[in-house]
Image (cartoon, rainbow, N blue to C red):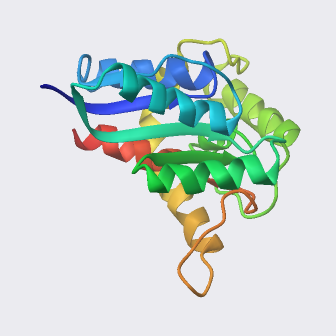
Amino acid sequence: MEQKAVLIALEDTKSSKFYFEELIKDKKLTGKVLFAEHIGTNPSKVLEAVVQHLENNRKAIYEKKWAIFDRDSWSKEDVNSTIHRAKQLNICVGISNESYELWLLLHFERLERHTSREDLNKKINEHFRNYFGVDYSKASQDIYRYMIGYQNTAIKNAEYLMKMHIDRNGNINPEQNNPITLIHQLVMCLNSL
């Protein structure tokens, strides 16, 4: 049987893919981490990419399987049913509400209140200009290299958001909570390999 550490399905084919590809190279995880073939951007399609990959590669064994997607404007039903189905299938979910750019912004600052996609992009662009002298671009393959020195800050800020949104029963509702991201859990998983 073929043993792999992690299988990842992403909603996009640029920004987060470039980030994780560079993280994998940096951590020398090439061959241990695979990406499922991209089949769509909505949450249920991202999860389906994991399921299809597993069906097409029955001999492969993964320590962890991840579906990474944004809350965006997807229906509450699509987001919540995808999260529920992923739990049933033992697939980890790395959702960001509002978008993946929240994960990037957390490298620079802590957020505590609802933030729109436009505000996230505006703030990231300001930080990129101030720190690196360039504009932020989803198509940039250099994002990880810019951000690596700030990764611990981003993880702490993401954990802070999770604690901020935990209810009395110890649960969070990433479909409803904004801002929140669970991407840091995948980053910590990859860092631990």
Question: Please, is residue 77 above or below residue 49 in the view?
Answer: below
- Count of numbered circles in the view: 0
Nearest the eye: 141 or 147: 141
Provide residue 60's location: percent of width, then percent of height.
23, 26
The image quarter containing residue 138 is top right
User: Which residue is found at the position 62% from the left and 28% from the top?
Assistant: 11
Outermost bottom residue: 168
Left or right: 112 as drawn, with respect to 51:
right
From the image, which quarter does the C terminus lie in? top left
User: Which residue is found at the position 46% from the left and 31% from the top?
Assistant: 50
The image quarter containing residue 165 is bottom right
Left or right: 191 as drawn, with respect to 136:
left
Provide residue 36's location: percent of width, then percent of height.
45, 22
Q: Is residue 168 visible?
A: yes
Q: Is residue 152 visible?
A: no
User: Which residue is found at the position 67% from the left and 27% from the top?
Assistant: 128
Provide residue 52's location: percent of width, then percent of height.
47, 25
Provide residue 33's location: percent of width, then percent of height.
31, 25
